[in-house]
Image: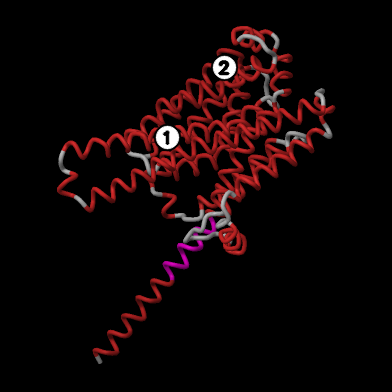
């Protein structure tokens, strides 16, 4: 199972490290290895959240996620995205941006860093909405009861998550405006950039997430209707709409996954510049890490890990909330990537340990109940 799921990741790792060795020697080899580990540690929570969505999709769309999805993740976000940032921020063509990345790496890094506020605002707002919608939903299983129970009650207020997100964005933009000179920009321009980018992230979440949820709900309704009217659903004319609807639902969930992955990758792409400004090594290292995140997502789905360890999804969403706030804080302050990675790892590890303790407690309770039943049978027999 492990080899089957992670086989492509192992192969890409070997090819990527060999390519790095040939490209820049042992120094490049070490940089690519470090970047791979950085990407995996920063995106582990991404894999857990992805698994919660991917388990709702059939085998076909899981394969699409691993093929087309990985092309988007590796080449789109880890290679094309940094070039697009430079092209847009410097008002130059994509070919010029690629040439700049290969010939003037310092200038390239400077332009990407200058674009960080808009990237952080967009990604931070998208991830913050995911966290808020999760935490305000009333769930049967709660991890931190003292937080989740009152928040679930507050979640009954319509559009509360959107209001909170907009307040956070407004505070972030105003805070950044007061310190815009540190990044070489004007107060108004940078504040507006942060505000507009954050609103764009919010709109993206609402459109993609809304469409995904809409078609998923429609699919569930259609399945219930077919279950109630079995005889009518057997006719070919009745089956086609259900298949088409499933396709739409899966497509928008896939689209949601890709936007989610893009938001998670922002910190990895920006953080990579702390290690190297070579776009080739960056693409190799982050690409290897992205492969492992994809494989880990599928592994969690196939092993049913989220069903066995019920608090993992909670821990991942708390990590998302922490990452969202970290991204927004980095608009003004620099935060080391090690801290970003450790926050997510600690939260997920805590949720995993809580799940293990819960499973042990349930097993002990079942064992005690079984012993009581046996004693009762013996007593009645006597």
Instruction: Report the disc number at residue 252.
Output: 1
Label 2 vs label 1, nearer the camera: 1
Q: Which residue is mark 2?
A: 21
> Which portion, as a residue range, is magenta?
353-364
Query: Among all residues in the image, which is located at the extreme front?
Result: 158
Residue drawn at x 59%, y 11% as measured from the top left = 94
CA distance separating discs 2 and 1: 40 Å
- Compared with 216, 307 (above or below) is below
- Compared with 88, 351 (above or below) is below
Secondary structure state at the residue bearing disc 1: helix
Residue drawn at x 69%, y 18% as measured from the top left = 89
Secondary structure state at the residue bearing disc 2: helix
The disc, 2 or 1, on the residue closer to the chain's N-terminal end is 2
Magenta region's main secondary structure? helix
- Give percent across and percent down for residue 358: 49, 63
| Viewport quadrant of the C terminus | bottom left
The answer to whether marks 2 and 1 mark residues whose Cβ atoms lie closer than 8 Å is: no
- Give percent across and percent down for residue 282: 60, 22
Mark 1: few, some, or many residues within 10 Å (few <14, many ≥20)? many
- Give percent across and percent down for residue 70: 45, 27
Query: Among all residues in the image, which is located at the extreme bottom?
Result: 382
- Does the stretch in magenta take in 55? no
- Give percent across and percent down for residue 254: 43, 34
| Viewport quadrant of the N terminus | top left
- Compared with 114, 354 (above or below) is below
Q: Nearer the viewer, residue 165 or 343?
A: 165
């Amino acid at each position: 199972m492990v080899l089957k799921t992670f086989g492509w990741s192992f192969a890409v790792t070997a090819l990527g490290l060999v390519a790095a060795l040939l490209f820049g020697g042992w120094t490049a080899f070490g940089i690519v290895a470090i970047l791979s580990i950085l990407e995996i540690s920063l995106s582990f929570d991404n894999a857990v959240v992805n698994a919660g969505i991917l388990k709702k999709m059939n085998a076909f769309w899981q394969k699409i996620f691993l093929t087309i999805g990985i092309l988007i993740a590796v080449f789109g976000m880890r290679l094309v995205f940094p070039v697009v940032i430079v092209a847009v921020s410097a008002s130059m063509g994509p070919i010029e941006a690629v040439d700049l990345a290969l010939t003037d790496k310092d200038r390239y890094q400077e332009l990407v860093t200058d674009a960080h506020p808009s990237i952080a605002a967009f990604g931070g707002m998208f991830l913050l909405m995911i966290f808020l919608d999760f935490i305000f939903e009333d769930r049967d299983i709660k991890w931190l009861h003292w937080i989740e129970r009152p928040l679930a009650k507050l979640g009954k207020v319509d559009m509360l998550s959107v209001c909170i997100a907009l307040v956070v964005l407004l505070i972030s933009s105003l805070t950044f405006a007061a310190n815009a000179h540190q990044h070489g920009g004007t107060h108004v321009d940078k504040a507006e950039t942060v505000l507009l980018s954050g609103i764009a992230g919010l709109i993206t979440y609402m459109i993609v997430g809304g469409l995904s949820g809409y078609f998923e709900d429609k699919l569930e309704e259609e399945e219930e209707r077919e279950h109630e009217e079995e005889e009518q659903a057997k006719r070919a004319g009745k089956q086609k709409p259900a298949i088409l609807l499933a396709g739409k639902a899966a497509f928008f969930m896939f689209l949601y996954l890709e936007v989610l992955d893009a938001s998670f990758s922002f910190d990895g792409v920006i953080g990579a510049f702390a290690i190297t400004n070579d776009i080739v090594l960056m693409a190799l290292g982050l690409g290897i890490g992205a492969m492992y995140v994809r494989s880990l997502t599928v592994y969690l789905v196939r092993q049913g890990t989220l069903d066995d360890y019920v608090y993992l999804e909670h821990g991942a969403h708390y990590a998302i909330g922490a990452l969202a706030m970290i991204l927004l804080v980095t608009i003004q302050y620099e935060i080391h990537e090690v801290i970003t990675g450790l926050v997510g790892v600690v939260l997920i590890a805590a949720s995993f340990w809580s799940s293990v303790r819960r499973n042990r407690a349930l097993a002990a309770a079942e064992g005690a109940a079984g012993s009581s039943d046996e004693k009762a049978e013996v007593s009645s027999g006597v």
